[in-house]
Image (cartoon, rainbow, N blue to C red):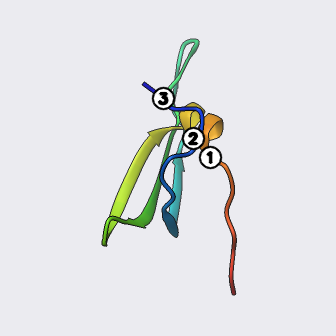
Amino acid sequence: MLIPDPNHWVALLGNIAIQEESSGNVDRDLVSFDVYTWGKKMRVDIAKISFQNNFSAAIARR
């Protein structure tokens, strides 16, 4: 179940990759990236449509 309001924030570390794959009318694109949460670095792999529907914002620092 997806929760429409954010209930957990993570630090986006980078290493972003988008894997595009289509099969007929089915969009199987995948977004992968590294985050820091719960005291450790984690890799996230999520369907592109879920990422688009749930990603709120990013603040970049140089």
Residue indicated by mark 3: 2
Q: Secondary structure at mark 1?
A: loop
Q: Quadrant of residue 34?
A: bottom left
Mark 2 or 3, nearer chain start: 3
Residue for point 67% across, 49% down? 56
Which residue type carries mark 3? Answer: Leu
Looking at the image, residue 29 lies above or below residue 26 = below
Q: Which mark is residue 27?
A: none
Q: Picture coordinates of residue 31 (x, y %)? A: 51, 46
Which residue type carries mark 2? Answer: Phe
Extreme-top residue of the structure: 25
Looking at the image, residue 46 lies above or below residue 49 = below
Q: Secondary structure at mark 3?
A: loop
Q: Which mark is residue 55?
A: 1
Residue indicated by mark 2: 51
Which residue type carries mark 1? Answer: Phe
